[in-house]
Image: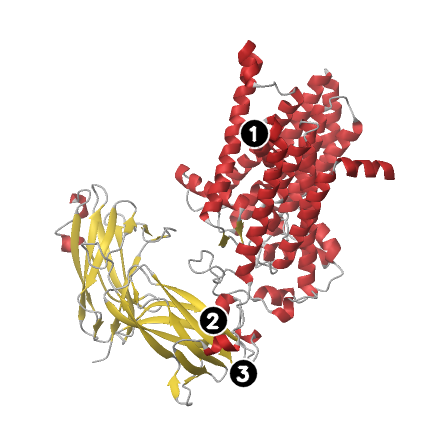
Amino acid sequence: MRIRVQSLACRHWGILVVLAVVALLGTAYNLAIPVLEKPDEWWHYPVVKYLADGHGLPVYDPNAEQPWKQEGSQPPLYYALAALITAWVPTDDFWALRSSGNPYYLSMPNGPRGDNQNIVIHYPDREGFPYRGSVLALRLARQLSVAMVLATVLATYFIVLEIYPGSKALALGAAAVVGFNPMFLFIGSSVSNDAMVAATSAWTGLAALRLALRPQANTRRALSTGIALGLALLSKSSAVALIPVVGLALIIAAWRARSWSQLLKQGILVFGVAALISGWWFLRSWRLYGDPLGAVVHQVAFRGGRTTSLTFDQLRLELRGVEMSFWAVFGWRSVVVEKRIYNVLFALDRLGLLGLLILAARQTWLRWGAKGARKALLGALLPADTLIGLGLLILWSGGVFIALLRFMSLVYAEHGRLLFAALAAIAVLLIWGWRQFIPRRAVAVFSGAVITGFLALSVICLVVYIVPVYARPPQLDQAAIEAIPNRLDVTFGKQMRLLGYRVGTDTVQPGGALSVTLYWQCVAEMDTDYTVFVHLLDENEIVVAQRDTYPGLGNAPTSTWRVGEAIADTYLIPVPATTYAPAEAQLEVGLYERRSQQRLPVYDPDGTSLGDNVRFASIKIVPNAASEWPNPVRFNFQDRIALVGYKLDRRVLAPGEAAHLTLYWQALAPLDEDYVVFVQALRQGDQRWAGDDSLPQKGAAPTSGWQADQVVADEHELAFPADAPADVYNIEIGWYSAATGQRLEVWDENDPRHEVSSRVKLSKIRLVDK
């Protein structure tokens, strides 16, 4: 036995090296990323905890507030194994751990890397090494996923050897595509069932290939295929895509053995064993939810699923998100890599697909069309086993992709990890596609390049893109403190000192952003996490832009600071595209307790009270150039009408007075329906104190007569009653159908995210007492 193991190790030393490196990387992805910072971990782990605490399988209840949300309906294999290895760990502290969410989390940050991309606020005394309590349990459950990554890598290696024996170079390349895929390492070191379904599906696929390519009846092979399929189905419902793959493999085996009785016997054994292992789960889901796959639970959990139908254009956009997150979208989809990296990965995807099409065309022509010299030019005809194997891999990956499309039609789910049930198949197909452009003598070099490239990518993603997101800002030494510009030395609540500041520019345009660096120092220990606010305040004392965050952009809550610690904290303050210009502005900074909204008092270096904030710097808000409209913007109302600019005759007035707002509309298409403009001045809480609903130009320019590209200047009066309270009011505008009252949707073309709404917020105005 020892001799046989040594012989296997000598013949397959390459995959052992790959596995060792993947194990190290997977562990690094586990330990370097704080707990609960991976997709749905704070819903997956409660299922593990519930089982570990001896409560049995959870049941999803749409009418109850449950900690596992939709994950309570997932097949139980991963959760049961994770519970088994963590049951000995006391985890009563988990609820406190999960409750420390980051209130300023940015799912789509526009600022510097690490700007509130952590969904949880982390405390070193709770989460630091040596791990204990829930943190230890989470790390152990993550490491179970790492083991599943290794199992997937190994199965991928043997899949290639099964369909093309002797090609260890290609097998190692495919294994590297799986094991060094940064997203698989990220998900495969999280508390999640995605790595489990990737592993069990990979071994099921390998077993199915062995059935098809070794057609002689073999009870052990059939039994192992049934076991693998049953375990895959108990891992995640996406594994149902493997059922037709296994079925086709059985048919191919019977056809090649010329024995249809073999198909019957082996089919009963394979699917019977799979049903014994997993059938009870699907019957349970059917009884509890009316759906054996549990997809309906996801719809209910996410408020009914999709609110709009999945159009072709929307599908194309979401599939781009799927492709991005198949390779490299981290955190809770908030951490992305450089666009050029995605471009390279997308190019590789398309090159692999092109290579497969070339292979299919070449093999078809070789088998049925080419003759003589042309046949020699096209190369060798692949063995039947290889073609059968590639066909099964295509069916496997295609089935998982179709299942994803079906799921996307029910809920918003542009997650590449949902393809990991076919990750092994996809990796092998990509390698085979790329191989079509490589000379035979260069296959080993090609494989080495694939291994090196993906290994480098996985390390770069961890070190350059992921770890900095969760890193605490470095402390300033004494020399750095002495070099701080624009000294202020004001103290907040005798606990924090603002040493100075730096502003990136003294001018900013609407739609731009202002970079502000504040230099903070702790002067007394704190047991409260205070929020920093940075306001851009115009000459009318209207806040035109602001940022609110914990220090360190979410990574340095004040309760963790030590006396004397100092950091440089840079905030990017987005200035809305609707900001009124020109204007004079200054910065206003303070600290407050988030729940009570109580601000800390501010004192100058002499101890004199400055109130609850400090103001400094002089910023000019300048108009955007190259526009014929005042305050140019671009808001698109369902491709019918665009707001291209606006102006106000005054922005400060008294109760009983009126402001006049002129809106500049552009027709985006000929219109045959009348729409009504609504304009309203809203106080906090959407209290309407002034407004005007009318056809454009008081009915003189109804939209039913507008032609494409026509621009209409439309004036509205905002008359405030005499009892209107002195305050700051938001001006909001929009359109609705004169016939039905239905509002037009609007998206901001100034914002690449094109977020949809039914109204546009313009400038704020202030009412002051006479």
Amino acid type of the residue that numbered disc 3 sits on in the rendered structure? Ala
- Residue 158 appears in the rendering: yes
Q: Nearer the viewer, residue 479 or 270?
A: 479
Going from the N terminus, do you reach mark 1 or mark 2 first?
A: 1
Foreground label between 3 and 1: 1
Where is residue 576? Give x, y as percent. 32, 61
Residue at the spot 63% in from the left edge and 37% down from the top edge: 173
How far is disc 3 from disc 1 in space, using C-alphas? 65 Å
Q: Secondary structure at mark 3?
A: loop
Amino acid type of the residue that numbered disc 2 sits on in the rendered structure? Ala
How far is disc 3 from disc 2 in space, using C-alphas? 18 Å
In the image, taking residue 708 as reference, residue 564 lies left or right, namely: right
Q: Tell which residue pokes out farthest to the top in this image.
A: 372
Where is residue 357? Give x, y as percent. 51, 26
- For the rendered model, the colour scheme is secondary structure
Q: Is 198 located above or below residue 33 in the figure?
A: above
**Classed neighbour count for the residue bearing mark 1: other residues with Cα under 10 Å, few (<14), some (14–19), many (≥20):** few
Q: Which residue is mark 3?
A: 524
Going from the N terminus, do you reach mark 3 or mark 1 first?
A: 1
- Residue 438 disc label: 1
- Residue 369 appears in the rendering: no
Amino acid type of the residue that numbered disc 1 sits on in the rendered structure? Ile
Where is residue 50? Give x, y as percent. 68, 57
In the image, taking residue 315 as reference, residue 50 lies left or right, namely: right
Q: Tell which residue pokes out farthest to the left in this image.
A: 700
Please identify the quadrant where the N terminus is shown. Answer: top right
